Amino acid sequence: MIINKQAEELNRLIQEKNPVIYNLLSKKGRAIFFPKKGILSQTAEAKGKKINATIGAAIEDDGSPMRLKSIAKNILLEPKDVFPYAPSYGKPELRKEWLKQMKSKNPSLKGITSLPVVTNALTHGLSTVAYMFVNPGDKIILTDKFWGNYRLIFENGYGAVLDTFNTFKDNGFDTAALRKKLGEGKGKKIVLLNFPNNPSGYTPTNKEAEKIIKIIKESAELGNDIIVICDDAYFGLIYENDVYCQSLFARLADIHENVLAIKVDGATKEDYVWGLRVGFLTYATKGIDKGVCQALEAKTAGAIRGNISNASHLSQSLVLNALHSKTYFAEKKEKYHLLKSRYEKVKSVLRDKKYKEFFAPLPFNSGYFMCVRLKNIDGEAVRKRLLEKYDVGVISIGNMIRIAFSAIRKELIGELFEKLCVASKECAQESK
Ligand SMILES: Cc1ncc(COP(=O)(O)O)c(C=O)c1O
């Protein structure tokens, strides 16, 4: 791959100050840069000029963004916050506000981090991380309970190999399995942690979180260069007391020079805006300085410029206005309590011993989901039975059933498990 001069400049800066980060960059990550003299930069320099013939957008005679009434009439925001392109890095005010709130939600996050770069929500954030850091053949270490789309993102998209370790042991997180997996071979390692987890709905307890952090630190001390990607899609939805309620990113951010922590998060689930597509990528490592942060941000913005150019300005403005709203925290609290009440209902329904014959819940304490493991019954058969006979939709994953309690009215949760039980019983009898 030919390396452009601007990419070389960024690489030199990163290599001089944080050689580990340079080593971790993929071939594409080394080659990418944000064009300094491209159309966007030339347009930025011309801002405010009497005659500005730079931008690839149309302007009304009064200087406002050209727009159709049939679109504008449905939007209360000012046209300038909707119709023009947003920067490839994302709206500056939104990036600053997201970081400010990230710090207040994660008091352990004390060191320097990059400014979050705006992505087209988390899927695109994860894919951009892969662009920057994953070469074909690289392994990605993750729990064996994982979001299925990781395959399309990392394997199909970038030729990576998902390398799983056992998620649960004795009703808790299997930290020994993580330690063992990290201990296989030396060199570059990519770890992907997703808590609250999809599909299991599990977040490590405080004790387990400390162990995970220690295991990663020890692996770094042994000389491994480690990227830890924290997929924080469901951040904040913790329903039990002894569960780690910050992002692991907060601690991993300055744990060791050999650990590059990357936070992938966004408004999608945190702010209940699945269709708006607003996410963020934030970098940190021990001893990182602003210059290296900016170099990583420039490379990330370059990758975004070359893929989607920039994320929706309308969506970014909607999220920014919400973050500034006086009622934002109260509104979020209300939704959190609604989801928590559904979680508690699931817990209480499952106390009934009759379910034990057919399925057992996997550990869960957070997020949108929980899973049950069926006892010698095929998950797909149960799913189909529920659909066809009982008017119920669930997801089957092998011999597990994933239930999105986030989407079920509390009054229907008892009925859901009752029907799951009956369908499981029928399928078990038929397979005998
Ligand atoms: C663990 C996890 N990460 C990322 C995503 C993707 O989120 P987004 O819709 O913001 O791309 C999801 C969505 O289901 C998810 O479950």
Image (cartoon, grey):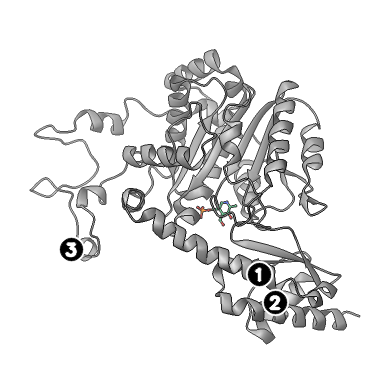
Along the line of sight, which residue is nearer the eye, 302 or 411?
Answer: 411
| Extreme residue toward the right, this view | 432
Type of residue at label 1? Val
Residue receiving disc 3: 69
Relative image position of residue 44 (x, y in whole percent): 25, 31
Relative image position of residue 29 (x, y in whole percent): 54, 30
Residue at the location (72% across, 24% down)? 224
* Res 373 seen here: yes
Relative image position of residue 94 (x, y in whole percent): 35, 42
Which of the 4 image quarters holds residue 420? bottom right
Tell me the SS state at disc 3.
Answer: helix
Question: Which is more N-terminal, label 3 or label 1?
Answer: 3
Q: CA distance from mark 1 to mark 3?
A: 48 Å
Residue receiving disc 1: 346
Q: Residues within 10 Å of mark 3 (few under 14, many from 20)?
A: few
Relative image position of residue 429 (x, y in whole percent): 87, 83
Q: On screen, 226 above or below 175?
A: above
Q: Residues within 10 Å of mark 1 (few under 14, many from 20)?
A: some
Q: Residues within 10 Å of mark 2 (few under 14, many from 20)?
A: some
* Proximity of marks 1 and 2: CB atoms separated by less than 8 Å: yes
Residue receiving disc 2: 417
Query: Quadrant location of the C terminus?
Result: bottom right
Tell me the SS state at disc 1.
Answer: helix
Q: Is mark 1 within 8 Å of ligand 1?
A: no
Q: Is residue 80 left or right of residue 428?
A: left
Question: Which is more N-terminal, label 2 or label 1?
Answer: 1
Q: Nearer the viewer's eye, disc 1 or disc 3? A: 1
Q: Nearer the viewer's eye, disc 1 or disc 2? A: 1
Type of residue at label 3? Lys
